[in-house]
Image (cartoon, rainbow, N blue to C red):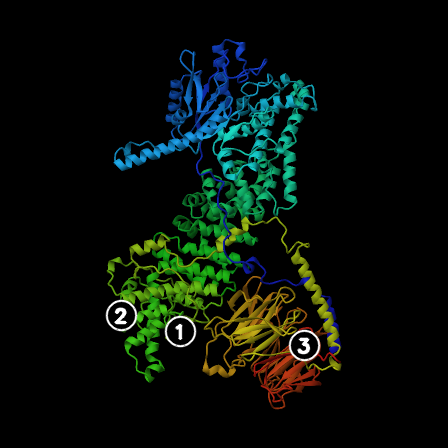
């Protein structure tokens, strides 16, 4: 037989580990359930400004040159593209003024324009003060053309005229500042203009100092404070100057005299002119002249024409240069705050490039870094060259016009940047161009695709795109009806709202939510797109009443309810979250949901196979409870029904994620019906006090009533901490004070007419709440959750239950009467509802109440002073949601998914990732180890298994041991802890201890995902299963079996461990193929838990009234399973059958408790080996109804432990002083004596044994606290 088993093992070697699934690898297991790190919002302008008034001050004095500048002959003469000498001087002046106004109107047509031509000081003052008065807090532009007057002075003066034009009159910048006020923008088109910029700041500082001095004088004299004008603020003033302080303007006759103004107001015209002048000798089309560029067809605002396309490209390029060069804050201020300012600064970049070629450097305040050599100017030159190359053909016929490939090329460059990776790289410089491309229907689809890929890189990319100004464009695109854009827009909007939820207001204001309502209800759309639409709508209604109202009017409730059964789990999850956010604190949506039976439809999701969906459903039902603004009997009955359904279904959930949401949801019941829960808690207190009075300690040592009540309060909290010891000082009245509080709560609760859920005998103690009511069952649920195996759930539950206990304590220590009229009427509990935990009803005695109150840490929270009874004020406070005892981060964690990359390949699917290579190495190592193990198995008959490979002494005798299949690790359990040992290096890797004060004993151990990154599963006597990482971090924990109830009458039937205590989880098996835990113990059923869905899969009746003591699974990964019981029976199951029919064989030959068994597979048939405490070992062919005796091993001493190695065809039996090794047939091989050369006395009896799953290694733990590992003798 051993040879056949070895052949099966060889077949197993060939089986690849890649085929096995992995458990507990989801994000909910591998990361903290908390929201993402939010990025500070910087893209949205704190305040938008508008330039509403423009002062055009033109000082030309046509025909008279200023005395301080010698002009060349010929020289530049054009002003606003008009030759002033070609017409009478006055008409020329008026035409220039009119043209300048038209040029500015191109950029800001709605501004108020005022001209003053060759003005006096008084005229300038009148103009400026008038415009400032009308502009109020908005921006005013002051344009100064000083070509006909002297240069500005070093004292900070510009020049104007006297009334007769016989003198130049200085105008102080200090005065101009005063008249213009702030915010303002100044354009100086004159020589030496930089002088004005330099002195402007000095004058501004001087004005601020003068104001501070005046303010100080007024404060000292206590007079005139109310007469003071507002303080000057010139920080928001912007200046653009044509040249530096020591430079004069270019005089090239081919250029206009006001080249700076031309660059600012007619950039395309001057750019074309300059380009032809610079490149006339080496351009692609040398025949293009300065005259022909004026014939370029089209309109600047029509992108379909040649001229309009050039303007569009120019805007994109200058925006890109600015965005890539300027600090973000400065870019926002200059290029996004004001349309006119943004246009002027885009054109200023062109002015710098052109005028630097004539040794003239424009100046700005705030100063900009040099941009004239930016690489994007080369793209501009290429666009101009391509435009001019086809100009002759276009002039013949506009049909010959071919659009520029500029935007296509830039999108390709953006695509290349995205494809080459993004780590540690500067942002793509083409991002502003993508924004411009969104305006074009031709390129929009591709631009949106690339934009979506960029936003998918993470929150930093979203913030970058928003800062460049993408938001208004994607908001306006929601008005598009193009179906092909839907998936792209919903993806982009999901990314934006995941990073910045404040966009919800913009969405509602522009009716953009209707776009996503349309997508969500269109079931022909892909589920991913509908999920993103649901997320967008969930963000829109989140704590935003206007959004909730808009969504309700859009029938969001019915749209969501119709799709709750969709196959996509992500969609189901977000439909539930959307509903929860919609009716959170919004009564209208709640009652709309009631009419559609929304709460009942959500019940189906409480059993969903995906934990995140179940958690979302619990969240939605929790906010459903908390959304009623007015309490009525109907509303309360609905809330009671919802709460009981939540408790009955979700409290048994395997996932702590879901159970946390349960606590958060049920706290709303506690807050709303606080007084009723206080009555239940006080009833519990009275029972505890009665038990203290009736306890044996009272008969042994007389105790006063006062001491008894103090002891009852001390034991009242599961925490048993000092917070409750302080009450002893206030218990001078003994039980009377508690009775007084009890009567006060009773007086309020009695008006509530609370009825029983079902017919249950009344409690022996006086009670305000009948046994079996909603409140008592919910309180019993909280008591159970206080002892939840997962610390996070337990601490949250304790925060809620301790809050009620605090209120009872305060009520008992501070008695006061409450008027009957102030008590709110609580409705009766609904009848004919399912009760809580039918297997274990709420405790009816003090002993049971205490039993359910396990010790644990109390979550710190702020103590709130709250009323002891529910009156109108406290109810309103509850309904307004101002009180929250516990919160979770599940929703924020769920939102984080949309902010993270979803398009990039994950490391799990990337075959080039380090994690993939590590996994491949592990799987190769595993296969090699299995191969080496076959060689070891072939040496069994020639070598003894008595070479002591590892030995250590422990503080406590080990109760169970387990080998890791592939690592040199041995797992050993000691009382309430377990340790991982490295038996090769003789070292302890880690020891994981139970919580302080915990008495739960580890009864069984399992490795999960042993072929990969393994986890450790432990079963404990409290009925819980916990899954740990090798570093000691808890992954998950749940109540796998009901907590054991100690019953002296049945103790002879219960399974006992080495310590003799009653067990909850007695056996634990892990099926890697099916991702199932099989849990058994002192129960008539085997509980199957699915690690994939984190739900109880099924309950399999054992058919025995005795505890399950051992279990073995199908070694081939099939559906066979066998168990041994404490009555000596061995039972075989086939899990392919229904639970009540799957027990296919029962062997009753053993007369004592089954110590161990193993299911083996050979030649297509199954066999099993079992050993009992009486010492008999039996072999069973599963095709036969009886088991054959193999051997008797104990020689009258009893079998203490047994381990089977099915691949090697051997088993080991431990007795009082030795370990005997046998062949599968029962033939003895050898004996391992538990003695040592240095201390020949025999040690304690064997307590536990375990073979390595593959290798011939045997671990033994003894009652004398020793742990050993034996291997084959290497010399044989």
Residue to which mark 3 is pinned: 1257
* SS for callout 2: helix
Label located before the other in sequence (1 or 2): 2
Residue 45 in the image: state x and y as whole percent. Answer: 46, 38
Identify the mark nearer the N-term, 3 or 2. 2
Is any part of residue 862 visible from this angle? yes
Q: Front-most of 313 and 1009?
A: 313
Q: Name the residue under label 1.
A: 850
Instruction: Name the residue beneath numbered marker 2.
Output: 737
Q: How far apart are marks 1 and 2 (CA)?
A: 22 Å
Nearer the N terminus, badge 3 or badge 1? 1
Answer with the quarter of the image where residue 967 lies: bottom right
Q: Distance between the residues labelled 3 and 1?
A: 46 Å
Q: Residue furthest top?
A: 88
Q: Is label 1 in contact with label 2 (beta carbons under 8 Å)?
A: no
Callout 1 secondary element: helix
Q: Residues within 10 Å of mark 2 (few under 14, many from 20)?
A: many
Q: What element carries label 3?
A: strand
- In the displayed orientation, state which residue is furthest to the bottom: 1196
Whether residue 133 sits left or right of residue 1162 in the image: it is left
Density class for disc 3 (Cα within 10 Å; few <14, some 14-19, many ≥20) is: many
* The C terminus lies in quadrant: bottom right
Which percent across, then down, holds residue 736?
26, 72
């Amino acid at each position: 037989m051993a040879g056949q088993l070895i052949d099966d093992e060889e077949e197993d070697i060939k089986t690849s580990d890649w085929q096995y699934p992995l458990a507990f690898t989801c994000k909910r297991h591998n990361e903290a359930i908390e929201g993402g790190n939010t990025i500070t919002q910087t893209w949205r302008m704190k305040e938008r400004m508008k330039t509403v008034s423009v002062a055009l001050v033109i000082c030309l004095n046509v025909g008279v040159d200023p005395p301080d500048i010698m002009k060349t002959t010929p020289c530049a003469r054009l002003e606003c593209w008009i030759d002033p000498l070609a017409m009478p001087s006055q008409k020329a002046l008026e035409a220039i003024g009119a043209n300048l106004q038209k040029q500015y109107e191109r950029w800001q047509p709605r501004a108020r324009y005022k001209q003053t031509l060759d003005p006096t000081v008084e005229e300038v003052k009148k103009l400026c003060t008038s415009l400032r008065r009308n502009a109020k807090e908005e921006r005013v532009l002051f344009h100064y053309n000083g070509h006909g007057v002297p240069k500005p002075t070093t004292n900070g003066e510009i020049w104007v005229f006297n009334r007769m034009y016989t003198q130049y009159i200085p105008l102080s910048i200090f005065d101009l500042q005063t008249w213009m006020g702030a915010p303002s923008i100044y354009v100086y088109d004159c020589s030496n203009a930089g002088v004005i910029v330099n002195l402007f700041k000095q004058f501004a500082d001087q004005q601020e100092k003068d104001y501070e001095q005046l303010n100080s004088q007024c404060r000292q004299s206590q007079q005139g404070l109310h007469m003071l004008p507002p303080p000057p603020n010139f920080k928001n003033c912007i200046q653009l100057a044509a040249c530096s302080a020591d430079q004069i303007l270019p005089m090239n006759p081919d250029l206009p005299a006001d080249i700076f103004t031309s660059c600012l107001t007619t950039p395309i015209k001057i750019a074309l002119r300059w380009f032809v002048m610079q490149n006339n000798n080496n351009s692609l089309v040398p025949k293009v002249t300065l005259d022909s560029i004026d014939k370029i067809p089209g309109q600047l605002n029509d992108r379909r024409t040649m001229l309009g396309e050039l303007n569009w490209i120019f805007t994109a390029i200058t925006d890109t240069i600015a965005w890539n060069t300027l600090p973000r804050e400065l870019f926002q201020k200059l290029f996004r705050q004001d349309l006119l300012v943004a246009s002027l600064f885009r054109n200023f970049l062109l002015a710098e490039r052109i005028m630097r070629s004539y040794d003239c450097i424009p100046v700005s305040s705030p100063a900009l870094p040099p941009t004239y050599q930016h690489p994007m100017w080369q793209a501009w030159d290429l666009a101009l060259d391509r435009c001019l190359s086809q100009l002759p053909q276009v002039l013949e016929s506009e049909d010959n016009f071919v659009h520029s490939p500029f935007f296509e090329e830039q999108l390709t460059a953006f695509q290349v940047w995205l494809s080459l990776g993004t780590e540690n790289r500067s942002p793509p410089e083409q991002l502003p161009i993508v924004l411009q491309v969104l305006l074009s229907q031709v390129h929009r689809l591709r631009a949106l695709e690339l934009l979506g890929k960029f936003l998918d890189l993470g929150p930093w990319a979203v913030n970058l795109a928003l800062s460049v100004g993408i938001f208004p464009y994607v908001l306006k695109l929601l008005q598009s009806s193009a179906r092909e854009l839907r998936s792209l827009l919903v993806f982009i909007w999901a990314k934006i709202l995941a990073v910045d939820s404040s966009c919800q207001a913009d969405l509602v204001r522009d009716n953009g939510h209707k776009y996503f309502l349309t997508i969500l209800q269109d079931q022909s759309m892909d589920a991913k797109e509908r999920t993103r639409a649901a997320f967008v709508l969930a963000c829109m209604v989140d704590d935003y009443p206007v959004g909730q109202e808009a969504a309700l009017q859009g029938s969001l409730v019915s749209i969501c309810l119709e799709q709750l059964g969709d196959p996509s789990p992500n969609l189901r999850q977000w439909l539930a979250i959307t509903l929860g956010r919609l009716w959170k604190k919004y009564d209208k949506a709640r009652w709309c949901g009631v009419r559609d039976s929304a709460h009942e439809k959500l019940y189906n999701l409480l059993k969903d196979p995906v934990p995140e969906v179940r958690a979302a459903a619990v969240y939605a039902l929790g906010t459903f409870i908390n959304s009623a603004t007015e309490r009525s009997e109907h509303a309360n009955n609905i809330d009671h029904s919802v709460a009981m359904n939540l408790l009955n279904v979700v409290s048994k959930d395997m996932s702590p994620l879901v159970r946390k949401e349960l606590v958060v949801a049920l706290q709303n019941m506690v807050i709303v019906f606080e007084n009723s829960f206080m009555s239940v808690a006080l009833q519990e207190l009275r029972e505890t006090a009665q038990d203290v009075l009736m306890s044996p300690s009272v008969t042994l040592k007389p105790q006063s009533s006062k001491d008894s009540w103090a002891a009852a309060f001390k034991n009242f909290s599961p925490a048993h901490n000092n917070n409750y010891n302080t009450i002893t000082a206030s218990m001078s009245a003994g039980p009377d004070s508690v009775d007084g509080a009890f009567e006060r709560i009773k007086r309020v609760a009695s008006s509530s007419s609370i009825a029983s859920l079902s017919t249950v005998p009344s409690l022996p103690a006086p009670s305000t709440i009948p046994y079996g009511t909603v409140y008592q069952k919910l309180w019993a649920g909280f008591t159970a959750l206080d002892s939840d195996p997962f610390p996070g759930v337990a601490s949250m539950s304790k925060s809620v239950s301790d809050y009620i206990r605090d209120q009872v304590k305060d009520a008992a220590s501070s008695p006061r009467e409450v008027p009957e009229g102030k008590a709110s009427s609580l409705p009766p509990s609904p009848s004919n509802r399912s009760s809580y935990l039918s297997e274990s009803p709420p405790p009816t005695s003090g002993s049971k109440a205490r039993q359910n109150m396990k010790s644990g840490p109390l979550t710190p929270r702020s103590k709130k002073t709250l009323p002891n009874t529910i009156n109108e004020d406290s109810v309103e406070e509850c309904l307004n949601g101002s009180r929250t005892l516990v919160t979770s981060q599940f929703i924020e964690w769920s939102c984080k998914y949309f902010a993270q990359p979803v398009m990039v390949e994950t490391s799990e699917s990337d075959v080039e990732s380090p994690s993939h290579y590590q996994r491949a190495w592990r799987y190769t190592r595993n296969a090699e180890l299995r191969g080496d193990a076959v060689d070891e198995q072939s040496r069994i008959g020639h070598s003894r298994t008595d070479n002591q490979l590892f030995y250590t002494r422990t503080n406590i005798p080990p109760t169970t041991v387990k080998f890791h299949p592939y690592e040199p690790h041995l797992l050993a359990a000691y009382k309430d802890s377990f340790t991982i040992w490295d038996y090769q290096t003789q070292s302890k890797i880690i020891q994981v201890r139970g919580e302080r004060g915990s008495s739960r004993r580890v009864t069984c151990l399992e490795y999960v995902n042993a072929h990969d990154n393994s986890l450790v599963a432990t079963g404990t006597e409290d009925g819980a299963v916990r899954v740990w990482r090798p570093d000691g971090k808890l992954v998950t924990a749940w109540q796998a079996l009901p907590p054991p109830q100690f019953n002296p009458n049945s103790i002879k039937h219960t399974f006992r461990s080495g310590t003799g205590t009653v067990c909850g989880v007695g056996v634990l098996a892990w099926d890697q193929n099916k991702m199932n835990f099989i849990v058994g113990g002192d129960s008539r059923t085997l509980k199957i838990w699915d690690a994939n869905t984190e739900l109880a899969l099924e309950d399999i009746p054992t058919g025995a009234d005795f505890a399950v003591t051992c279990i073995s699974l199908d070694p081939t990964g099939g559906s066979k399973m066998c168990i041994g019981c404490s009555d000596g029976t061995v039972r075989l199951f086939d899990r392919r059958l229904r639970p009540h029919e799957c027990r296919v064989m029962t062997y009753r030959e053993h007369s004592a408790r089954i110590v161990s068994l193993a299911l083996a597979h050979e030649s297509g048939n199954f066999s099993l080996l079992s050993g009992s405490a009486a010492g008999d070992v039996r072999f069973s062919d599963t095709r036969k109804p009886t088991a054959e005796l193999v051997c008797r091993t104990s020689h009258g001493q009893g079998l203490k432990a047994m381990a089977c190695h099915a691949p090697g065809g051997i088993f080991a039996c431990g007795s009082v002083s030795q370990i005997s090794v046998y062949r599968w047939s029962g033939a003895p091989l050898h004996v391992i004596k538990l003695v040592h050369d240095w201390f020949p006395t025999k040690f304690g009896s064997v307590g536990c044994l375990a073979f390595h799953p593959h290798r011939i290694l045997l671990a033994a733990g003894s009652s004398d606290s020793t742990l050993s590992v034996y291997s084959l003798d290497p010399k044989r």
